[in-house]
Amino acid sequence: MRMFRITGELPEGWVMTPRGEDGGKAHFESPDGRVDLAYYTLLPGIVMTDIDLSCSTLPVYQPGASFLATINWCSTGRCEVDFGTRGSLVVGSQTLCLSSSLAESFSYPTASYRGFEYFIDFDQFDDDTRSTLEPFGLTEENLRKVLVPHELGVTLSPEGSLLDAVHSLESELAHDQPRSAWLLLYTCKLFMLLAELDLGGLQVTSGYLQRSQRDIAQEVYQQIMADVAPSVDLRALSVRLGVSEASLRSYFSRVYGQSPAAFARSHALSSAARMLAETSLPVADISQACGYANPSKFSAAFRRAYDVNPLEYRRRSRLA
């Protein structure tokens, strides 16, 4: 039996459902959403999780491993990995993250995340693991070389054959019952390509933020969310927070993946969609409440975002 030794305790609220000898499913209901994941023990020391969530925070499970490296692929959404006083790392859509440090907490700035992650405990590697990896030119040494140096993580946007390997894994995970042999094959291919990377000569992205920078982004977010109108006084905020407007925009976009102005517009239109679905307010009133003095401009913006005009959106939402 290929088991990943679990020595820590699961956070309260997790429901685990084993499936066969090598995997299972887990579900968690958070105050603001839910998490569903499937986990697969591919080899001793290598576990893969397929993650689908719609919430803003997630309790951390500390597996108690003596050494744990992670490989995280974010397909959609955004994930902030908090390393406490050392800062945090933001993993955005279509980004691969390599790390060798366990996080203190996870949060999801856009309240959604879809992707997969590997947990690699080199101390659990055995002869089965090593003999399976060997035909792909993989050894514990070359895997450590690409994973271990990145304590707080490094993020990169894969291209070419590396991106193809990621897409192969996504396609297999999309099956109702992913085939373990194919997951293992595609995993070995992904690991082989990562081991061949020259990260020193590769253009990597850095989503690392200091705690103070993250707090500034959060302050802007709270200002935007406090009002459905798509407006925020960045100049006043930058003066109050003691940073330049350029820095304020940079911190925010690194966490939330959009400029403050674009995020505020998206928030206003999602608020409008909710009001259209849940109330009988006239479209003109909703337009005004969401910061659009001209209903025609509101309708045009709404159509660009939702592919239908406001009245049609209301009609469809009530038929659903």
Image (spheres, rainbow, N blue to C red):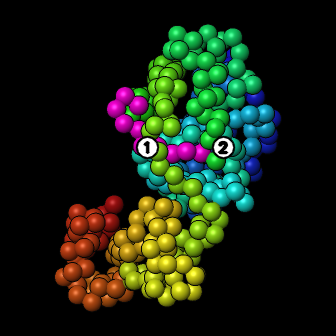
Tell me: residue 69, above or below residue 287.
above
Left or right of 22 in this view: 110: left
Residue 16 sits in quarter: top right
Please report the residue visible at 36 percent of the width from the left and 71 percent of the height from the top: 262
Residue 134 on image: x %, y % = 57, 12
Indicate which label's residue lies in the foreground, 2 or 1. 1
Q: Which residue is mark 1?
A: 203
Magenta stretch, residue numbers: 153-162
Please report the residue visible at 49 percent of the width from the left and 78 percent of the height from the top: 244
Residue 185 on image: x %, y % = 48, 19
Residue 60 on image: x %, y % = 70, 49
Question: Which amino acid type is shown beneath numbered disc 2?
Answer: Glu
Q: Which residue is mark 2?
A: 151
Residue in the foreground of this view, choosing between 280 and 53: 53
Left or right of 257 in this view: 65: right
Residue in the foreground of this view, choosing between 222 and 100: 100
Please report the residue visible at 38 percent of the width from the left and 75 percent of the height from the top: 261
In the rendered structure, does residue 154 fall within the stretch colored magenta?
yes
Question: Which amino acid type is shown beneath numbered disc 1?
Answer: Gln
Label 2 crowd bin: few (<14), some (14–19), many (20+), radius 10 Å: some
Q: Is residue 29 visible?
A: no
Q: Secondary structure at mark 2?
A: loop
Which of pointers 2 and 1 lies earlier in the amino acid sequence? 2
Residue 314 sits in quarter: bottom left
In the rendered structure, does residue 192 fall within the stretch colored magenta?
no
Residue 160 on image: x %, y % = 34, 32
Q: Is residue 251 visible?
A: yes
Label 1 crowd bin: few (<14), some (14–19), many (20+), radius 10 Å: few
